[in-house]
Image (cartoon, rainbow, N blue to C red):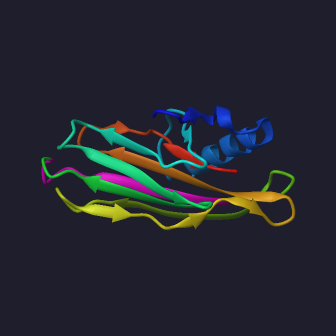
Amino acid sequence: MGRLGRLGGLGRFRKAAAVAALSAALAGGMVTAGAAPASASGFNWDDQFGPTGSGCYFWTTWSANMVTPHGYQQTGDAPSNWCMLSVSHIGYNADGTIGYSNTRGPGTTTGPGSEMDGPSWYYGPWGNGGYMCVIIGVRDYRLDVGSRGPSVVYCP
């Protein structure tokens, strides 16, 4: 993942809030339990699941506190396989409680060569001392690999 670290780039309060949101997302069935997400605030992120050319490739486009996730089922993949993308938009109040939550997905590819795009969502300061986060979960069902939890978190 290059320059991206696991939740280490977040402050202690925000790290605790992000972990709480991830737990809520897991409990709500958005994704299944697993590895800690990378913190990608201020960067584009990408990851390949499965062999290059026949797996799932996921990436984000980031600009000025807006992030859009994307997924691509590579052309060498079998027609019966698919890639999954879920995205949550969480607004934290100044006291760390969740004041807003919206989840899209999971969305899936439709076969080899298909692509999907998630929503373009804002992350950064919000309300009176609060902040918005974007939490992205991805998975390659061909190999049953990828995140068992959110893969990447965009938080200020």
Image location (x, y in percent) of residue 120: 51, 67
Query: Image point 41% across, 45% down: which residue?
Result: 46
Quarter location, residue 131: bottom right
In the rendered image, residue 42 lying in the magenta stretch gets the answer no
Quarter location, residue 143: top left
Query: Image point 45% across, 54% down: which residue?
Result: 60
Residue 136 sits above or below residue 125 on the image: above
Q: Which residues are magenta?
A: 77-92
Image location (x, y in percent) of residue 36: 55, 34
In the displayed structure, does residue 113 sit left or right of residue 14?
left
In the rendered image, residue 91 lying in the magenta stretch gets the answer yes
Query: Image point 57% across, 32% down: which residue?
Result: 5
Q: Is residue 29 visible?
A: no
Quarter location, residue 128: bottom right
Q: Is residue 41 visible?
A: yes
Image location (x, y in percent) of residue 123: 65, 59
In front here: 30 or 4?
4
Residue 74 sits above or below residue 66 on the image: above
In front here: 36 or 43?
43
In front here: 137 or 129?
129
Image location (x, y in percent) of residue 26: 55, 46
In the displayed structure, does residue 37 sit left or right of residue 141?
right
In the displayed structure, does residue 3 sit left or right of residue 133?
left
Query: Image point 31% across, 47% down: which residue?
Result: 57
